[in-house]
Amino acid sequence: MLAATNEVKLQKIITQKWIAGFPEGQEAWSDYRRTGYPKLFPVIKNYSGGTISTQFGVRRINYVTSEKATNAGGVASGVAKLGGPDNGGTRVWWDTTGPNF
């Protein structure tokens, strides 16, 4: 393990954390989006109509209908800052595509 790269060490840690956190999935899902680990099975059938990448999966939760109805200005401001549409395929600010190290 000492000779392993930082990337391999991160993969092992996040995979163990994913297993431990699976019953409460929000943190595990966030770690996956942030690091790309653990390696998950690819999606066989993507029903998103092209809005969500088969390779990367769901990146965020859409604004809910009640928020759109009661806080239209806030939703519009938030969507403008996303840099993409209000759908599950748009990355959030900390969900990067760059390397972990």
Image (spheres, rainbow, N blue to C red):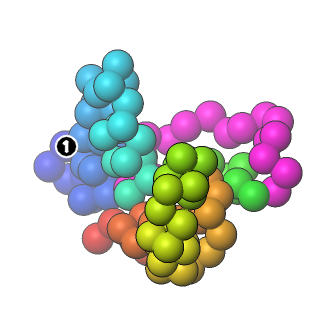
Q: Is residue 56 visible?
A: no
Q: Is residue 26 visible?
A: yes
Residue at 44% x, 53% y is 33
Residue at 55% x, 37% y is 40
For the residue marked with disc 1, what is the amino acid? Met
Could you say where residue 99 lies in the image, as x and y percent from the top left?
40, 71
- 18 lies above or below 101: above
- 72 lies above or below 18: below
Could you say where residue 54 lies in the image, as x and y percent from the top left?
72, 50
Q: Is residue 66 left or right of residue 2?
A: right
Residue bearing mark 1: 1
Q: Quadrant of the C terminus?
A: bottom left
Check disc 1: other Cα within 10 Å, few if <14, some if 14-19, many if 20+: few
Main secondary structure found in the magenta portion: loop
Query: Circle 1 sits in a helix, a strand or a loop, which is it?
Result: loop
Could you say where residue 14 lies in the image, as x and y percent from the top left?
30, 41
Q: Which residues are magenta?
A: 35-50
Instruction: Kindly give the residue lying farthest to the top in the view shown.
Output: 23
Camera-side residue of 71 and 1: 71
Residue at 80% x, 42% y is 46
Camera-side residue of 29 and 75: 75
